[in-house]
Amino acid sequence: MKKLFLILAACSGMFLGIIPAHAASKLKVITTTMDLKSIAESIGGDKVDVESLGQGNQNYHFLAAKPSYMMKAKRADLFIRSGLELEVGYEPLILEGARNPNIQIGRPGHLDASIGIAALDVPQEVDRSMGDIHPSGNPHHWLDPLNAKIIAANIAERLSVLSPQDAAGFQNNLNRFDEQIDRKMKDWRKTLLPYQGERIVTYHKSWEYFARRFDLEIVDELEPKPGIPPSPGHLKDVIAEVKDQKIKVILQENLYKDDAARYVASATGAAVVVSPISVGGTKAVNDYFVLIDTIVHAVADGFQKADGAGKGSNT
Amino acid sequence: MKSFLSVLCILCLWAAPVRAAGDGDIRELKEQMQLMREQFDDMQASYEQKMVEMQERIDELENKQAASAGPAKDEEQVQQLQDRVASLEQNQNSNQGLAGALNRFNPSISVIGDLTYHTTDQEGGEADNEFNFREAELAFSANVDTYARGDFFVAIENEDGATEVALEEGYLTLLETPVENLQGKFGKFRPAFGKANRMHLHSLAWADYPKVVQNYLGEEGFSEAGASASYLIPNPWDVYSELTLEGFNNNDAAVMGGASGGDAVYLAHLKEFFEFSEALTLEVGGSQMYGENNEGEGAVTRVSGADVTWKWKSQTPGSSHGWAWQSEALFSKREQIEDGEDGASLTADDLDSWGMYSSLEHSLTQRWSAFGRYDFSQMPADSDPESRGYSTGLTFAQSEYAFWRVQFTHTDHETAEDANEVWLQLNFGIGPHRAHTY
């Protein structure tokens, strides 16, 4: 036993001798979502090396705390979470397993990107009978482009703390990011202007921030409660609502099967819009601006399809 | 007829200049309409532009308002917020607020219950043949301070009709130590032998622990008081490589073949984790335990283990398909030392025995999963009796917090009658519970 221990200790020492030096020229940033990665890259530029634990085609609520994630977090200078309990299921294990004191909660190397964002759907009471709800509010805040400006400002501030010599560059990048958001907002608004005030149905409570920003009204979800798959009884109620209120579009992310949406659509004539909800949700969505572009045009196309089919009366 | 023709001529003569004038008017009208259309288009574009600018201004004002005053947007919400602030101030002044604030330091508390109906056709079998609330696990977890976390797991168990309360685990984890990559654990904990022994009942893919675990480590594995150090071995490939060294009390007869009292068991475990893709991972582990037994003066038991776990999860959006293939083998070498006739100690033949299991679990949908498990096990005190078990089961997870399971097990006993068992299991929890190790 003692021999075994000595052998293992010697092996550890051998590895210590050949570990490459930490690349001090770039800050190593780990994010929990691809959207945070995209924004962090916009702000950090060539001063950061950003990697996301979650991928855009995954449900960020249900990532597993894989040891490989711990190894990525272990080398991070900055760990950015989306916040509002999106990562509550796995973040504690990753932060503890990473054994990186710099990224623990409360340290400069840990950032909650949702700071300063006015959360929607903050429940008055919290109980599991309400489904998969988040006590701090709806966590899908990145789908409002104006929230992206807040996230970007948070990231710029924290990068400036960690790398003060590059603060001016981060601020310039932030200004450029904000200007681009403002520019694109004009285009996005123009595209969705004809559909201001339109009512829609969604699959999951993911689209509240997007709907508020672009003046769409979400009437109901296909899930009877968050995280509970659609039931026949609830879909029957949704069909009645869609017909009664002449709803033209059912919007859902491509993380879920679209069977329920297509069932409601076939009974009502509404158009089903399936869209990525995160950067990397499809191969073409390679940054935050492309993501919002994709969602905006998908929704607009959905309304046009519904209007063109002439099934707005939902008989 | 002449009158008609006259009127007709007059009408034609009258209409001719009108028509001539009309052609010109129509052209003029068309030009005017075109001009009006163009003006209308310009107005519409200007209107849309103004709408966009107005909305941007509204957005800007809303953001400023949200940043300074939260989500309140109208008088009613402002009043509600003011009422809420007043209420909070009152609570703070009346000490209710103080208690409320202190409550935020309370640990995460959860309770997980396990109900079974277990039946067997084996005469004299250990099955209950009745409903059994097998265990209620109370878990408490919180940060102790900036350096450590504390965890307590209290099991209220039903053993042969009697209710027993036992501290299953209670330990302090030092998250930061003076040595980089090193963490420590002190208290009573499940030793890091293999994989299944470290898993709590509610996190198993099966209704019971594998036979080799039950026979060598305890019916639900084992836990002991001691100390543990785990070190993430740095390497140029960034592979997760964790070495765990532990020392704990030698009190468990099933593990080491009888305690000699006061001596410790020493354990080393090496865990390697490889991620081939987002979908496919491999975990490989090796374990070694060493401690004195009661088979003679200085006799020791050595237990070695190897564990391999493959996991594959579909990356197709909307798909819940996945596979988990988990296997472990355990080898026990138990020295036996007898006193010779002349008083000198003689070493008898070592008692070697082993066991293993291999389980394949398939996630069919988000809520349904199925498994098949093969067990082979000898006994630590006697290698002759061998048993081979064949289990299969189906699990329905109504949510992340409750599942229902049915399991069928057929066991071939070499020295006893073969047995068939059926398990019905319900497991449910309330309160926040830490996520399980991957």
Image (cartoon, coloured by chain):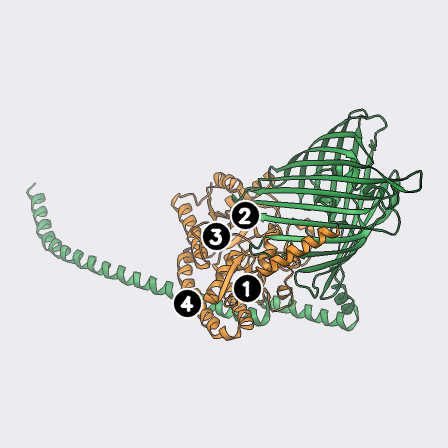
Chain for disc number 1: A
* Residue type, label 3: Gly
Which secondary structure lies at badge 3? loop
Q: Give the left or right position of residue B21, taking residue B182 as reference.
A: left
**Pointer 4 and pointer 1 on the same chain:** no
Q: Which residue is mark 2?
A: B278
- Give residue B359's position: percent from left, percent from top: 67, 36
Q: Is residue A195 visible?
A: no
Q: Which residue is mark 1?
A: A21
Which secondary structure lies at badge 2? loop
Mark 3 and mark 1: Cα distance apart in space: 31 Å
**Could you say which disc has been placed on residue B53 in the image?**
4
Mark whose residue sits in front, 4 or 3: 3
Chain in green on the image: B
- Give residue A269's position: percent from left, percent from top: 46, 41
Q: Is residue A158 visible?
A: yes
Q: Give the left or right position of residue B181, taking residue A40 as reference.
A: right
Q: Residues within 10 Å of mark 3 (few under 14, many from 20)?
A: many
Which secondary structure lies at badge 1? loop
Pick the residue in front: A313 or B61: B61
- Give residue B48's position: percent from left, percent from top: 37, 62
Mark 4 and mark 3: Cα distance apart in space: 31 Å
